[in-house]
Amino acid sequence: MSQGIPKISEFPCDDRYWRVDWFGAIERNPNVPSEPFLQIVISPLIQNESIDSTAKHLASTHVTNYDDQTVIKIGVGQLPFISIGSIWLNGQCQAAKAGQTKLLHNLHITEHTAQSIPGNHKVEDKNLIPYESYRTGKGFMANLIAIEHDKDPFGILVPVMELIRFYYAVSTDMAHIVFSGDLKHQPQIVLNTKKCGFDEGERRCILHLRQHLSDEDGWVIGRALSCKEAWEGFTLPHDTIMKHSLNTKFLHPQSAFPFSGSSNLKVRGKFIPAKDEISKNGWRYLVLAIEHCTAPFPFEHLTADRDNNNNQGEGENEINGGDKKPAFPKPKHKTSNADKPFQSQNEPNKNKTNEHVLLPTDRFGAIMGKKVDRPKKDQCRYISALRYAPKEDEPKQLGTGQGDSGDLKTGRGHAKPIRTRRQALPASFETFEEAIQLLTQVEGVKARLRPIEEAIEFIPLTKPADKRQWSYLDSNSYCRRQVIIADIHYQNRWYTLIEFEMRNKENRSVALVNAENFEYCSNQRMNNLLHQLAIKKGIWLNIPSIPNITIKTMKHTWSTPLDFKSSIFDRL
């Protein structure tokens, strides 16, 4: 399981690894009328025993069996759980991801530099995405956003559905709003428009959200209401679906970036060859997933109130609990352990417990460290009146539809993001980097920092995301422990050096790891090792013996990077 993502029943359970190749069309779900299907194009990996040796090349066309490529359908509310390039085994998302992480600096997004094109777009009568470079599936016309880069109007290609997933459908509730068009056509379902506004002086967006929406949803809604580009990107998916719904069963939405101007993007993707004469360097970049964006928001601060707000009053005239009105009598919300599978064949029972699966995220750099303000009040006139489902009535599976009163075995589930705070690099990491640079100067030694990937960027979580745990540097702010890894090649042998971020007064060791045959250790293997480390709270020596892996530890006793370098070399 990767970062608490639950099992999804629609993926094959055949002991094979399956790669998500592409997002397909939107279509109606006759079994769950409240939530349309999203098609997911998947294909099995050829080398099924282990993905370690293929981890570097998981985006290649040669690692999957294209003859077995197939399509599964999931409810659009499960879109936050899925990304192109993710790897699944028996319905569980794995740590490994296809594609290499890349930072796209100073990417300029305007109506002149970004254009919407179909997925099968051709340039000079040649496929923009060559068949031999990446296979999105036969007949799949899902739209792309082409961004001008290096004077090539098609220099960077982003799937439109990925744009929707990253910027707009950040949670199950937001996915429903995006594809239902409620923000534009039925805004009263989303917020009380009479109590919303914008304070120019403070650059503050003021929202009055409906009870079911989270603060993180508020940032996305506020952006859409405050910026014409964000409004267009938010409302286009539903509008384009409605425009073509009478003509075709399979609908491919359009969208747009929620800003205009420059931004830095952290993405996962691959280079593909350009077969035409437009590209000057002969290559284009296909984005599989966006992971972080630094573009500014149209406001600096966000205030979010709710209907029947039952937050405690701060005035002297606070009302006694017995005199308060029930605030929102609805089924209990609880945080899920992600141990129940999600499915899209049955409408969930709306009277069951509403379970939230928390997903750590730091996608928007502009709001890092910012909190949503709540308006102060003299009195609280409401008290919570939640209904609790009996234990014997616990649902066995979850769905992301809006729900009815039918199936008693299926409960409602929601993907809900929680924003994690990213620290500046610790001082020890700077020493680590300098020591690696010094090591490269030693004859016969090659050393480099391993590129940041999702599987190895942080210590993996061992509990649900809302629980206190060692994997967090600070559980109160959900601040993750960062990891730095270096690969060292010496005398035809590969070694891996690992350090992680420590709390004040913690004293943990740096580890030098090698496989028994001294082969390169993949990110998947590193993720498994870091997970074991998290269980043992950072004590390498307490990790049970791992077959074919040797771990040597070094205490932080060096005073300079040169001493650290010498300590590393002595152990090679």
Image: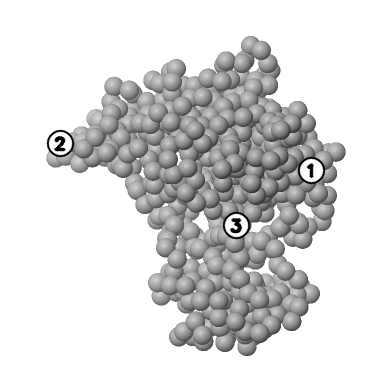
Q: Residue furthest left?
A: 316
Residue denoted by label 3:
453
Give the quarter of the image for residue 118. Answer: top right
The residues tagged by marks 3 and 2 sit, at their Cα atoms, a distance apart of 53 Å
Vertical relation: 535 (above or below) 108: below
If you read the primary sequence from the N terminus, does the residue marked by circle 3 or circle 2 appear first? 2
- Please name which of the two marks, 3 or 2, marks the residue nearer to the observer: 3
* Residue 314, image x, y percentages: 20, 41
Q: Which residue is mark 2?
A: 317
81 to 328, vertically: above or below: below
Residue type at mark 2? Asn
At x 73% / y 73%, what residue is drawn?
Answer: 515
Alpha carbon separation for disc pair 1 and 3: 25 Å
Looking at the image, residue 323 sits to the left or right of residue 274; the answer is left
Give how far apart the Cα atoms at labels 1 and 2 are: 71 Å
Q: Secondary structure at mark 1?
A: loop
Q: Nearer the viewer, mark 1 or mark 2?
A: 1
Nearer-the-camera pick, 413 or 98: 98
Packing grade of label 3 (10 A; few <14, some 14-19, many >=20) is some
Of residues 507 and 18, the one nearer the viewer is: 18
Badge 3 amino acid: Glu
Q: Relative to residue 339, is residue 308 drawn left or right?
A: left
Query: Which residue type does callout 1 highlight?
Result: Glu
Q: Is residue 66 left or right of residue 271?
A: right
The residue that appears at 58% across and 30% down in the rendered structure is: 116
Q: Which residue is mark 1?
A: 132
Position of 557 with respect to 5 (left or right) is left
Q: Are marks 1 and 3 in contact (CB under 8 Å)?
A: no
Q: Which mark is residue 40?
A: none
In the rendering, at what x and y percent does residue 260 appear? 43, 37
Identify the secondary structure beneath mark 3: loop
Q: Earlier in the sequence, mark 1 or mark 3?
A: 1
